[in-house]
Image: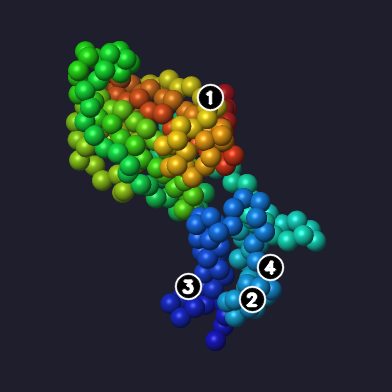
Amino acid sequence: MDDQVTQDSTPIFQRIKDYLLAEIAAGTWKEGDVIPSEQALVKQFGVSRMTVNRAVRELTAEQVLTRRQGSGTYVAQQKYQATLLEIKSIADEVRARGHAHRSSLQQLERVRANDLMAKQFDLPPGHQLFHSVIVHFENGVPIQVEDRWVNPQCAPDYMEQDFAHITPNEYLMQAAPLQGATYSIEALAAPRDVADMLAIDTRQACLVLKRQTHSGGMIASLVTMWHPGHRYQFAGSFNQ
């Protein structure tokens, strides 16, 4: 049988890629770790060297792996990108890179606004707000903790959404069309709960994007997005 295809019609080189990605996501090999040699993978999967080479070559081109001449193949430092000049769904950004997105809902609640939060939303203290915390993953690797507060006047059905299938951004773009936004970026050490969700040490710096969006003459949402600094970067371009 041709070793390029498995019995379920999945190309074997893709199965090898999926295996390597899964082991990296599970932490078997971390950034900077050497992965098994091509000869070891040939023996493990019972396929040709050409098939293994294609899987490793494609992961290298996708910047998941990096090759060092005479030394071996290593897990590359991951730098996932987000664009700043337009507000996009993180799921769309991940899929545009040909990668798999998934999310994990950590918290979804109705909260009475304290004085500070009420002032940020220009609402009276005690006004109800919606609050969600979601972890976003790219190829199984946690790349963002999204801590979002939402004005129910702009998005009354926020609490009824299935955030495993739609991101808050995707829902809010429909429910509260964007009029404008302000944002800031800073490097911060992650608090313990955020570090745990991102699977990083609290001593590692995070890139933190804070954004306020406006819709219908009101402040629609306030979101703080935590990204592991060693595997994330912001990028953009501008043409006049």
Query: Foreground residue, 161 or 106?
Result: 106
Q: Is residue 173 left or right of residue 6?
A: left
Q: Alpha carbon of mark 3 to alpha carbon of mark 2: how far? A: 17 Å
Sort mark 4 into few (<14), some (14-19) or many (20+) by Cα contacts within 10 Å.
Answer: some
First in sequence: mark 1 or mark 2? 2
Classify mark 2: helix, strand or loop. Answer: helix
Q: Which mark is residue 186?
A: 1
Question: Residue 169: x percent and y percent?
Answer: 35, 36
Q: Alpha carbon of mark 1 to alpha carbon of mark 4: how far? A: 40 Å
Residue occupied by mark 3 = 10
Q: Is residue 78 left or right of residue 105?
A: right
Q: Report which quarter residue 133 is drawn in.
A: top left
The amino acid type, in three-letter code, at marker 1 is Glu
Residue at x 21% of width, y 13% of height? 124
Classify mark 4: helix, strand or loop. Answer: loop
Q: Which mark is residue 42?
A: 2
First in sequence: mark 2 or mark 4? 4
Q: Is residue 140 positioned above or below 7 on the image?
A: above
Camera sees residue 169: yes
The amino acid type, in three-letter code, at marker 4 is Ser
Residue at x 44% of width, y 25% of height? 210
First in sequence: mark 4 or mark 3? 3
Q: Furthest residue to the right?
A: 70
Q: Nearer the viewer, mark 3 or mark 2?
A: 2
Q: Nearer the viewer, mark 4 or mark 3?
A: 4
First in sequence: mark 1 or mark 4? 4
Q: Which mark is residue 139?
A: none
